[in-house]
Amino acid sequence: MKYKIGDKVKIKTWKEMEKEFGIHENGYIKCIGSFLFTKYKEKQFKKQFPNRIVEIAIIDDSDFKVKEINNWYWPIMSIKEKVVYEPINSRFEILDIR
C-alpha cells in the first residue's frame, strides 16, 4: 500500500477533485462508492486545515480517516501527495550558520 497510518498527506482542492470526478447535479462530488464530497465539507476542511495537510489515523483499501477528525472518511483518491518533512539535525541548520 502506498500510504500508511501516521503518514501526513496533502488533500486535493475542490477544483482538482471536480476536474477528476465531476460535479453531481446536486452540487457535490462523488468520488468512489458512496463517498460524497460536499461544499460544506470543503468549507469545514479549509477552515480547520488551510494548508490541506492531514495525518492518516485509519486506512483500508479505498479510504482513510484523518487523525484530527475522527468521524470523517476520505477516499484514497483524494490524496494529492505524501508530505515528507526532513529532520533538522541542529539549530545551526535552522540558522544556516557556518
Image (cartoon, grey):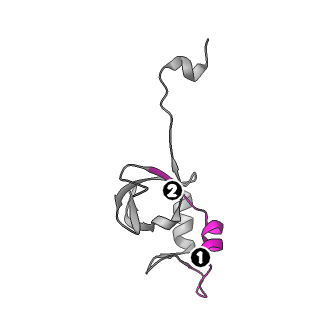
Q: Residue furthest bottom?
A: 25
Residue 97 at x, y percent in the picture? 61, 14
In the drawing, does residue 68 fall left or right of residue 18?
Answer: left
- Height in image: 83 above or below 18? above
Residue 67 appears in the rendering:
no
Amino acid carrying label 2: it is Gln
SS type, badge 1: helix
Residue placed at 57% from the left, 66% from the top? Answer: 43
Residue stretch rendered in magenta on the structure: 8-29
Q: How far apart are marks 2 and 1 (CA)?
A: 24 Å
Residue 51 at x, y percent in the picture? 57, 51
6, 25: nearer the viewer: 6
Tell me the tag on residue 44: none
Residue placed at 45% from the left, 76% from the top? Answer: 35
Q: Does the magenta stretch include residue 88?
A: no
Residue placed at 60% from the left, 82% from the top? Answer: 27
Q: What residue would you read off at disc 2? A: 48
